[in-house]
Image (tube, rainbow, N blue to C red):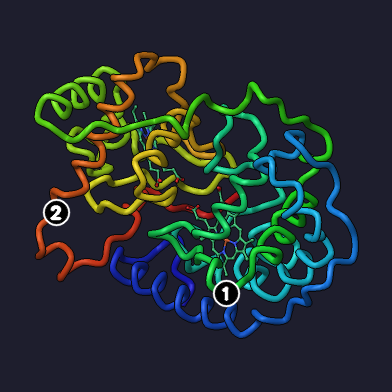
């Protein structure tokens, strides 16, 4: 069933579903083996680790417990060493991420900065909808999730070598209020979308068919899959704040740039979010009946270097 470089979109789509189901099942079988007994205090605390000011909750988590859990439930997809090399990787689109690079897409920090612990916790807890990456919140308890995050930090030397600064965190995410999608707001959002040239990759109507969509690759060499907004599925979550966070921080390791500098007016930012979310409602019932939304096929999948 190896179908990475040379197969039709629909066979690959099915391969993804099969792999997702099979791997999810495997992963499930391994869960529930975590002992709740803390063995060692979590390193650090306070802002330095980006633990969301919740040092107490992190104290009973340990990288060693995380390592054990990772081997049981994550390694099937991400590889025993977390480098993304697993048997199922070849049939998943997008493939499981190489976690040894320390490049995390979904962060609340500026482009290029380390993710906060709470960012990684969110990705593991909620999963990445629309991809094979499952949500773990119902299968692992709060301590186990935190232990896994501590273990993720041991996979890349970036976490030992770089410091997190309060300034790296994009401002006021919690205070973001997205306005109701009135026609006025949407018109302004569309204007920002055009001015910021989001359509170069995402397409004029947000279908992921922009001219530049096929020319980019992820930093690890895998083909990049430009997001088609009309599915209404967001890896980072459908919450308007999550979409706001995405274009403010950019998605590190992918071609998706950060716009925290270039889109400066707060009302422009909010209108853009409302506009992008409105595109998700443009698919009719037939689309959902006839087609499982998946990643737009890259023009040239090619072997991964
Ligand atoms: C069924 C396969 C599968 C399993 C099991 C799985 N993942 Fe993933 N994971 C993926 C895929 C696929 C992606 C990449 C999605 C993408 O690039 O959009 C991913 C991405 C990630 C990311 C990147 C998030 C970001 O912000 O960039 C992290 C972190 C991660 N996984 C951690 C884990 C952990 C921890 C576990 C175990 C608790 C786990 N994964 C189990 C498939 C899986
Ligand atoms: C250079 C190409 C490029 C441009 C320009 C671009 N994007 Fe993206 N965008 C991407 C790619 C590639 C992804 C998917 C990355 C991934 O998940 O691996 C993406 C993903 C997204 C997502 C989905 C996040 C999720 O949760 O799944 C949002 C929202 C988004 N972009 C918004 C925007 C907005 C708004 C603009 C304009 C201000 C924009 N993008 C401009 C390439 C681009």
Q: Quadrant of ligand 1?
A: bottom right
Residue 233 at x, y percent in the picture: 32, 54
Q: Element type at marker 1?
A: loop
Q: CA distance from mark 1 to mark 2?
A: 32 Å
As drawn, is 209 to the left or to the right of 26? left
Place residue 196 in its image quadrant: top left
Q: Nearer the viewer, residue 5 or 236?
A: 236
Which residue is depicted at the point 52% across and 82% down?
A: 25
Mark 2: secondary structure: loop
Q: Is residue 241 above or below residue 259?
A: below
Position of residue 70 in the picture relative to residue 131 (left or right): right
Measuring from the top left, give residue 109's x and y in whole percent.
Answer: 58, 31
Q: Which mark is residue 283?
A: 2
Give the residue at the far right of this rendering: 40
Q: Is 106 situated left or right of 116 in this image?
A: left
- In terms of depth relative to the viewer, which is nearer, 146 or 277? 146
């Amino acid at each position: 069933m190896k179908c990475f470089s040379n197969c039709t979109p629909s066979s690959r789509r099915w391969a993804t579903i099969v792999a997702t189901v099979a791997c999810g099942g495997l992963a499930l079988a391994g869960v529930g083996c975590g002992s709740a007994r803390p063995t060692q205090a979590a390193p650090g605390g306070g802002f330095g680790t980006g633990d969301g000011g919740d040092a107490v909750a992190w104290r009973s988590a340990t990288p060693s417990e995380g390592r054990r859990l990772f081997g049981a439930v994550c390694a099937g997809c991400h590889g025993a060493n977390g480098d993304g090399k697993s048997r199922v990787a070849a049939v998943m689109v997008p493939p499981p991420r190489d976690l040894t690079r320390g490049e995390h897409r979904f962060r609340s920090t500026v482009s290029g900065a380390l993710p906060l612990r709470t960012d990684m916790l969110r990705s593991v807890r909620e999963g990445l909808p629309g991809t094979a990456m499952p949500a773990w919140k119902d299968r692992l308890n709060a301590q186990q999730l935190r232990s896994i995050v501590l273990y993720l930090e041991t996979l890349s030397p970036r976490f030992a070598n770089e410091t997190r600064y309060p300034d790296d965190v994009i401002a006021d995410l919690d205070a973001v209020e997205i306005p109701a999608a009135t026609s006025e707001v949407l018109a302004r959002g569309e204007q920002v979308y055009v001015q910021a040239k989001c359509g170069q990759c995402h397409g004029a109507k947000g279908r992921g068919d922009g001219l530049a969509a096929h020319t980019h690759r992820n930093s690890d060499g895998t083909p990049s899959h430009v997001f088609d907004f009309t599915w209404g599925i967001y890896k980072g979550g459908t919450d308007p704040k999550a979409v706001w966070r995405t274009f403010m921080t950019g998605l590190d390791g992918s071609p998706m740039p950060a716009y925290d500098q270039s889109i400066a007016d707060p009302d422009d930012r909010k209108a853009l979010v409302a506009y992008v979310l409105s595109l998700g409602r443009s698919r009719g019932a037939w689309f959902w009946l006839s087609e499982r939304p998946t990643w737009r096929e890259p023009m040239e999948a090619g072997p991964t270097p």
